[in-house]
């Protein structure tokens, strides 16, 4: 009779995602994961052929988590790209390990930063459409300009170089939109 499986794939990925969220993807090793899951490495390799397959699942979970995080984040402005920028900067502040994984890492498992950011809900596409409705002649160019500011601020927040209060961030996002418009 085959041995009963006590450590499920779901449990492994949940534990691995938590480890990546808390300590960063570089710390998701078979041994660390086994210790956190309270098992040997055998259940991990029963579910995953190799660590690369597990890392890909962690990355996909992080993409889903970002989309969920953004959808639940506060809406702070009527101007296009302000909510997007605020949510992205807050994500970097609240989830620095996942931010590094998704937006600063070299390995993206075939997804561009735009695809990760836009997600299934079309976040960026909706904001560009909103900009077009507001009379912006080239929403793509405006997005690029805004994105340089947004991504820079988010990166500064995870290095400790961004200490602005939420209201200051919102004011700067609105000001940036209006100056680039």
Image (tube, rainbow, N blue to C red):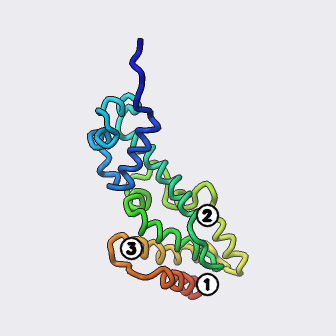
Q: Evaluate whether residue 141 shows in this view.
A: no
Q: Is residue 111 left or right of residue 124?
A: left
Residue 127 seen in this snapshot: yes
Q: Is residue 27 left or right of residue 10?
A: left
Is the C-beta separation of discs 2 and 3 under 8 Å? no
Q: Earlier in the sequence, mark 2 or mark 1?
A: 2
For label 2, count other residues whose C-alpha is less than 10 Å away and answer few (under 14), some (14-19) or many (20+): many
x 43%, y 76%: residue: 153
The mark nearer the N terminus, 3 or 1, is 3
Q: Position of residue 71 (x, y in %)?
A: 59, 62
Residue at mark 3: 157
Q: CA distance from mark 2 to mark 1?
A: 19 Å
Q: Which quadrant, please, contains the N terminus? A: top left
Q: Earlier in the sequence, mark 2 or mark 3?
A: 2
C-alpha span from label 3 to label 1: 25 Å
Q: Position of residue 21 (x, y in %)?
A: 39, 55
Residue toward you, 33 or 4: 4
Q: Residue at x 41, y 48 (%)?
A: 17
Which residue is disc 1 drawn over?
A: 181
Above or below, comparing residue 133 to residue 2 in the picture: below
Q: Residues within 10 Å of mark 3 (few under 14, many from 20)?
A: many
For the C terminus, the image quarter is: bottom right
* Residue in the picture at 60% in, 66% down: 124
Indicate the secondary structure of the residue bearing disc 3.
Answer: helix
Which residue in the protein does label 2 denote? Answer: 123
Which quadrant of the view contains residue 135? bottom right
């Amino acid at each position: 009779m085959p041995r009963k499986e006590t450590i499920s794939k779901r449990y492994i990925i949940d534990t691995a995602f938590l480890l990546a969220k808390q300590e960063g993807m570089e710390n998701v090793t078979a041994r660390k994961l086994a210790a956190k899951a309270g098992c040997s490495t055998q259940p991990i390799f029963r579910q995953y052929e190799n660590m690369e397959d597990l890392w890909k699942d962690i990355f996909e979970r992080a993409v889903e988590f970002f989309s969920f995080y953004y959808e639940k984040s506060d809406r702070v402005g009527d101007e296009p790209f302000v909510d997007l920028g605020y949510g992205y900067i807050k994500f970097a502040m609240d989830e620095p390990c996942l931010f590094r994984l998704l937006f600063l890492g070299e390995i993206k498992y075939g997804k561009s930063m735009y695809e990760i950011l836009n997600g299934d809900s079309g976040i960026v596409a909706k904001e560009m459409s909103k900009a077009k409705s507001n009379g912006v002649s080239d929403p793509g160019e405006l997005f690029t300009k805004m994105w340089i500011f947004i991504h820079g601020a988010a990166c500064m927040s995870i290095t400790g170089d961004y200490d602005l209060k939420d209201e200051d961030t919102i004011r700067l996002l609105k000001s940036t939109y209006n100056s680039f418009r």
